[in-house]
Image (tube, rainbow, N blue to C red):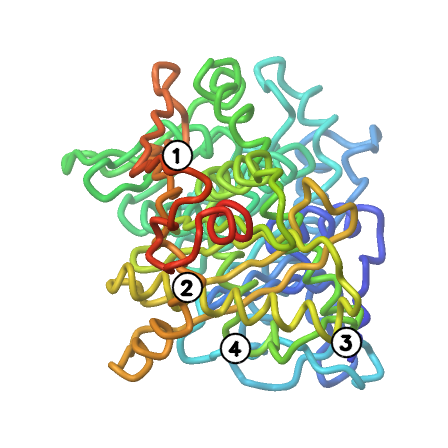
Amino acid sequence: MAISKSSGVTSTERILADLCERSFLKLWSYPNPFKDDRKELCDLLAVFEDHVFIFFDRESRHLDKTDKDALTNWERWKRAAIDDQVRTAHGAEGYIRSGRGIFLDNALTTPFPIDIDRERMIIHKIIVAHGAKDACERFSDDNVYGSLAITYGDTDGGLSWPFLVHLDKQRLVHVLDSHNLPIIFGELDTFFDLSSYFDAKIEAINRFDYIACCGEEDLLAHYFLNFDSANNRHFIGTNRQDINGLMIGEGEWKDFIQRDVYKRKKEADRDSYLWDEIIQRTCQNALDGTLLGEANLLRGKSAIHEMAKEPRFSRRALSSAMINAIRNFPDVDGEITRNVSFMPSFYERKAYVFLQLRKRHITDYDNDYRPKRQALLEIACGAAKNKFPALQTIVGIAIDAPKFSRKNAEDFILMDCREWPKERRLQYERANEELNFFGTSSLIATRKKVQEFPDPELREKPKKARRVKVGRNALCPCGSGKKYKRCCLGKMVE
């Protein structure tokens, strides 16, 4: 069944929807959902695993007026663009926690398609406030970008100052503006990266008595520059126990993006968007109701769900491995040629199997060839589990070799192999006897170290696991008993 989504009502809502589609991807972000009283719940609701992101997008033009002093205009703008939305955000959180219905249309005919676990959910309330940038830049020459200054604490002391927003640390809300909205969602454009930043921010707000930053982008730069190698994560603040407050100065982001380390990261990330393209294409098919197979991508686990969990730097490594495998696909004689790649995930005990096939004569693509390709992919995943017994989750991806095929359709498998009884192991051993996935002499092992911010001295050093030279009329070293040119060389190349 096709799912119709709003694209946002206002121009700023459409920008927000586009940014969220890139970060949360198409299946997990929905603009303009409705409550059961036919009123809008929020401007955008995104749900992935246990994280629920509630967005409110508002624009006010009070700061364009010149007939009042700056403080008066500021108070009016802040009340309309931020204060009212903060109260509405708290109300939306209460509504979601109540368990009442959420719908995609005001006719209440299309329920929100993602199940929300009210017991385990982590809610992030995000206000996006527009209309202050130009006035902020006019107010102070020291403001680099015209973004809002933010403080988190228990009290604001009753003071008000233009372009400074005080937020209650006990009822946490994130406030973004016209300038830093695309920065935050452009740099943290995966669910993992965005939720990790918010988690670190919440942890710091709870730890310190107050936190102040001259712009959310400056806080992001601080986050990127602080890395805890012991726990393998970025953090906000300091490990010193004698400090109870944190202030991030103006221009941290401006200085950070001039660094070579940042530029190397952006360059290295380019290939990673192949991973996003594969996910987005399949998500769009699901929304259009044209997706084949039995997987329900919205309700429950799926291969696409597992792929969407990967952080940006992991997608970089996975995409790079796929691109290299596609480039190196052999052009040899034979009716069928194959190439299979084993790629580890960012998550422990999880991996990907990427299978390419080239079949020269296909008579019935959908009803004959494609089911056989799916069966081969399943066997390859089972063979990977037998070879690497510690694996608990395997995602299989199968395509026609792009080197020789202009059009393509992907097949996906999610193999839950936490339980792997002897019968199942033997099943895939028997199925793999002739195919010999991950057992041929032509396997090449590559060890690669991936860093979020690449070291300029880091170089990839491929290592061949084993290479056996045989004559074309000799028996194949894979152990099949067939001649080499009829087996791994002439028929199946791995």
Going from N to C along the chain, the mark reached first, 3 or 2, is: 3
Q: Mark 2 against mark 1, which lies toward the viewer?
A: 2
Residue 435, percent across and down? 45, 62
Q: Is residue 38 above or below residue 398?
A: below
Q: Nearer the viewer, residue 98 or 232?
A: 232
Residue shown at the point (63%, 40%) measured from the top left: 181
Report which residue position mark 4 lands on. Answer: 300
Q: CA distance from mark 2 to mark 1?
A: 32 Å
Residue type at tag 3: Lys
Residue 464, percent across and down? 33, 33
Q: Mark 3 against mark 4, which lies toward the viewer?
A: 4
Q: Nearer the viewer, residue 254 or 148?
A: 254
Q: CA distance from mark 2 to mark 4?
A: 16 Å
Circles 4 and 1, Cβ within 8 Å, touching? The answer is no
Circles 3 and 2, Cβ within 8 Å, touching? The answer is no
Report which residue position mark 2 lands on. Answer: 394
Report which residue position mark 1 lands on. Answer: 223
Residue shown at the point (27%, 41%) measured from the top left: 232
Choose top left, top right, bottom left or bottom right for residue 96: bottom right
Residue 447, percent across and down? 32, 35
Residue shown at the point (33%, 36%) measured from the top left: 467
Going from N to C along the chain, the mark reached first, 2 or 1, is: 1
Q: Mark 3 against mark 2, which lies toward the viewer?
A: 2
Residue shown at the point (45%, 68%) measured from the top left: 379
Residue type at tag 1: Tyr
Q: CA distance from mark 3 to mark 2?
A: 42 Å
Report which residue position mark 3 lands on. Answer: 39
- Label 4 SS: loop
Residue type at tag 4: Gly
Choose top left, top right, bottom left or bottom right for residue 122: bottom left
Q: Mark 2 against mark 4, which lies toward the viewer?
A: 2
